[in-house]
Image (spheres, helix red, strand yellow):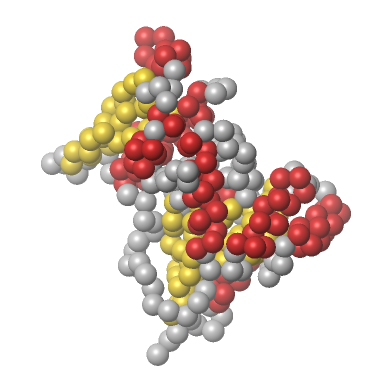
């Protein structure tokens, strides 16, 4: 009987290191939202990749995209940070995704903590297509001096260069054991949560300054239609009244543009027609509300 393998691989790193882009690249589909702005990821999103090892073993690689590691200011920030470190500690392998352009400053403290909290850390230098090659080896050596990385990879998540090598190495490194998910399942993220995340992504991309960081999106209703379509209503909550006016825009133009683009992306993700209605509400202090954070799957560490 062929050996099966299954393991959890966490992607951790500083904001904007390219974790979500790498997550989507390895998964082969767009599941985790990725924007040029830092601190986009809030949820612990899991995606499942099936690979066959060189020995013919069936490996299930469960990838987990985690929030970035940054200095927290709010209860929301602390909950995101706690979720990231908890995810790294639970994983069989933790991939430190480091932006090769940023050097040591952001990645070294994370590497040092990983050395004490993770069973098996691996180093992934990302964005190598944007850095002069002679700078990469000294950077990798310095980070390997900060933590006992078992493996080091250099890749570009944006272009995909090197991503296949990482998957080929992860497959045989998974522990022996039965697969945890059906072969057709690509994620454990509920469709309602995916829809809300895709709306929030458009808020990030279509607004500026502090607004995206003070916004949360929740799916309010989900109605299956006789023709196979789904009718979704989502609430976009902002922290301050001035932000509500900006997000709605003149005559509702901004929120309509956000909804139009999000509807297309949700329909692509669900592979079915989607009707999307967005409502903007004021929720001052939502990012300090334990119950609100719990709906996002985040726990206040206290």
Whether residue 23 is visible, yes or no, is no
Outermost residue toward the top in this view: 250
* Residue situated in front as seen by the camera: 275 or 102: 102
Asked if residue 54 is positioned above or below residue 225 in the image, the reply reads below
Whether residue 39 is visible, yes or no, is yes
Outermost residue toward the left in this view: 226
Q: How many marks?
A: 0
Q: Residue at x 39, y 56 (%)?
A: 187
Asked if residue 93 is positioned above or below residue 105 in the image, the reply reads below
Q: Residue at x 35, y 67 (%)?
A: 181
Q: Residue at x 44, y 32 (%)?
A: 288
Say left or right for 268 vs 160.
Answer: left
Asked if residue 236 is positioned above or below residue 125 in the image, the reply reads above
* Residue situated in front as seen by the camera: 48 or 290: 290
Q: Position of residue 45 (x, y in %)?
A: 44, 51
* Residue situated in front as seen by the camera: 226 or 244: 244
Q: Residue at x 44, y 56 (%)?
A: 46
Which quadrant of the view contains residue 223? top left
* Residue situated in front as seen by the camera: 83 or 177: 83
Q: Quadrant of the N terminus?
A: bottom left
Outermost residue toward the bottom in this view: 1
Say left or right for 116 vs 91.
Answer: right
Q: Position of residue 274 (x, y in %)?
A: 28, 36
Say left or right for 260 vs 224.
Answer: right
Q: Position of residue 243 (x, y in %)?
A: 46, 17
Q: Position of residue 160 (x, y in %)?
A: 61, 54
């Amino acid at each position: 009987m062929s050996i099966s393998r299954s393991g959890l691989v966490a992607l951790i790193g500083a904001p904007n290191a390219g974790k979500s882009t790498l997550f989507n690249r390895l998964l082969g589909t767009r599941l985790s939202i990725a924007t040029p702005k830092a601190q986009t990821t809030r949820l612990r999103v899991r995606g499942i990749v099936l690979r066959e090892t060189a020995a013919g073993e069936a490996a299930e690689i469960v990838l987990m995209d985690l929030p970035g590691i940054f200095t927290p200011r709010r209860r929301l920030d602390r909950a995101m940070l706690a979720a990231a470190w908890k995810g790294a500690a639970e994983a069989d392998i933790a991939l430190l995704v480091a932006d090769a352009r940023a050097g040591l400053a952001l990645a070294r403290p994370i590497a040092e903590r990983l050395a004490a909290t993770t069973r098996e850390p691996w180093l992934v230098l990302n964005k190598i297509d944007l850095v002069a090659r002679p700078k990469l080896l000294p950077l990798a050596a310095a980070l390997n001096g900060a933590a006992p990385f078992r493996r080091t990879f250099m890749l570009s998540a944006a272009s995909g260069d090197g991503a296949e090598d990482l998957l080929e190495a992860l497959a045989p490194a998974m522990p022996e054991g039965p697969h945890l998910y059906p072969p057709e399942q690509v994620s454990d993220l509920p469709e309602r949560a995916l829809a809300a995340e895709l709306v929030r992504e458009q808020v990030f991309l279509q607004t500026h300054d502090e607004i995206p960081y003070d916004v949360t999106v929740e799916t309010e209703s989900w109605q299956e239609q006789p023709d196979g379509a789904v009718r979704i209503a989502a609430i976009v909550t902002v922290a301050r009244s001035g932000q509500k006016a900006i997000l709605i825009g003149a005559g509702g133009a901004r929120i309509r543009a956000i909804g139009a683009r999000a509807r297309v992306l949700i329909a692509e993700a669900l592979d079915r027609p989607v009707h999307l209605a967005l409502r903007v509400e004021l929720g001052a202090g939502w990012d300090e509300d334990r119950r609100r954070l719990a709906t996002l799957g985040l726990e206040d560490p206290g």
